[in-house]
Image: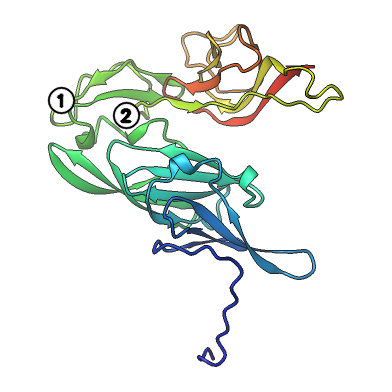
Amino acid sequence: MLTPSTFNPVLFDKRGCSAVKPASVDDAVVFVEASGERVSAAVLDGNIYLKWSVKPLTIFHDQNIKDPVKICGPSLNSAQPEQYAFIVNADGTIAAATWQTNLNAERVGFSPWETDGNFVSVTPVFDGYWAIIDRVIQNVTVRMIEKFSEDATMDSVIEGFTSDPALHLANREVRLYSQGAFSQPFTLDGTGVGDEPAVPDVRQIGLHFDAVASPWPAEITDSRRIGTFKSRVIRFIVSVQSSGPFQVRCNNNTRELGGYDFDDDLTNPPDAQTRLYRIPVFGSRDHPELEITRHVPGRLRILSIAQEVQA
């Protein structure tokens, strides 16, 4: 029984917690610090004797944290190897965190998410995530409940467009996607219907957005001559899994990868590619601009990114 005489909290860090409810993550608790601008984790670790310690998670990602109002922890029984947490900001955006093994700051990545509306809350339900979003439909703010789906290739997606009008996309420029094929942009009328381009059945309709990954160029290499020369990136290496077309930009040189390959039947949509691409870097190699962009509707799963450096 917990009583005032048996309750003996132990202070293990001077940082305080804000009023945002913390979220349980494995052997840790993720919380917003009292400043309201940084997210940390109280972690129970140790080899022989377990002890609590605090690890900041957003040292390199403070720009994505904007007065958080909600933390959503990982989903239980998820089939994915990655674990996710979502920080809902007061401006209606989300900072999505992902990791695989532990919550070391160097291994936790944060990505900014936004939608055609404002995120209010996110919560895990069984093996997925559901979000409450405020969207403006015909000049009226409507609160909607939506599910994050890895099968969705665009924002605000619905399926079966012929039978269900897309009211939340009325008067918006949208695209259709199905089985690797996508349409050019077209605009729906005020009732959420429009002239449909020719795209295979079982379609998705939604708002296209560019997904961008910009890695920091390698500037230090493990060499006996370290400090006596500048590292020069000569190749950018990208590995993708079951992905459609995407672009890779190295300085001013942009290449479109994926999509059709040699001997493909051009009358059918291109097959998803699982490949390793090696792209030469031209121009500035001391500090090149590297960027991966999903520029058309489709799936893009980046397995790894590497840089070949000239010693």
Q: Helix, strand, or loop for circle 2?
A: strand
Q: Is residue 186 left or right of residue 257?
A: left
Label 1 sits on residue: 189
Residue 250 in the image, given as x and y percentages of width and height: 57, 13
At 19% across and 27% down in the image, what residue appears? 193
Question: Is residue 81 visible to the viewer in this orientation of the structure?
Answer: no
Tell me the quarter of the picture where residue 196 sits: top left
Compared with 300, 62 (above or below) is: below
* Image: 139 above or below 88: above
Question: Mark 2 highlights which residue?
Answer: 205
Q: Residue at x 56, y 45 (%)?
A: 59
Name the amino acid type tagged 2.
Ile
Q: Which mark is residue 269?
A: none
Taking 133 as reference, is 2 left or right? right
Q: CA distance from mark 2 to mark 1?
A: 14 Å
Image quarter where the C terminus lies is top right
Three-letter amino acid code at the position of disc 1: Asp
- The structure residue drawn at horizontal position 64% and vertical position 50%, both measured from the top left corner, is 104
Question: Which of the pair 60/179 is nearer the observer?
Answer: 60
Give the quadrant of the N terminus: bottom right
Q: Position of residue 212 (x, y in %)?
A: 48, 26
> In x, y percent, where is residue 44?
65, 65
Q: Secondary structure at mark 1?
A: loop
Q: Position of residue 151 (x, y in %)?
A: 45, 36
Badge 2 crowding class, 10 Å Cα cut-off, few under 14, some 14 to 19, many 20 or more, is many
